[in-house]
Amino acid sequence: MTANPANPTVFQERIVPTDTVLVGYAALVQKYGIAAPVRLPSCVAKSFVYGSRRAHGDWTIFDKRFTPEDTFR
């Protein structure tokens, strides 16, 4: 599930990496306004990421081919 309410630039006091979309628990928490901590936020890049994923500060950034469908399932 992805979330993109106005493409947030900050998620739980962390700067969201440029040209990415929140995914996983971070997307759920953002989209539904859940008050829950997310220790390991993830996002998907809008472009190619060498090695399929990389760490960027507190974030795990996945390659664009891992973009999930925009459904709850």
Image: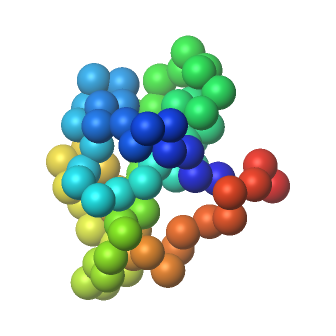
Question: What is the x, y in percent for residue 25?
Answer: 56, 41
Decide if residue 73 is in sight here.
Answer: yes
Question: What is the x, y in percent for residue 73?
Answer: 81, 55
Above/below status of 52 relative to 12:
below
Question: What is the x, y in percent for residue 27?
Answer: 54, 42
Decide if residue 26 is in sight here.
Answer: no
* Residue visible at 58% across and 52% down in the picture: 2
In the orientation shown, which residue stands out farthest toward the front? Answer: 6
Q: Quadrant of residue 43?
A: bottom left
Question: What is the x, y in percent for residue 63?
Answer: 39, 75
Above/below status of 31 relative to 56:
above
* Residue visible at 37% across and 37% down in the picture: 8
Q: Quadrant of residue 21?
A: bottom left
Q: How many marks?
A: 0
Q: Nearer the viewer, residue 34 or 69?
A: 69
In the orientation shown, which residue stands out farthest toward the left? Answer: 57
Q: Is residue 17 left or right of residue 41?
A: left
In the orientation shown, which residue stands out farthest toward the top? Answer: 35
Rendered image coloring scheme = rainbow
Q: Is residue 70 left or right of residue 26?
A: right
* Residue visible at 36% across and 25% down in the picture: 12
* Residue visible at 46% across and 32% down in the picture: 38
Q: Is residue 23 left or right of residue 73?
A: left
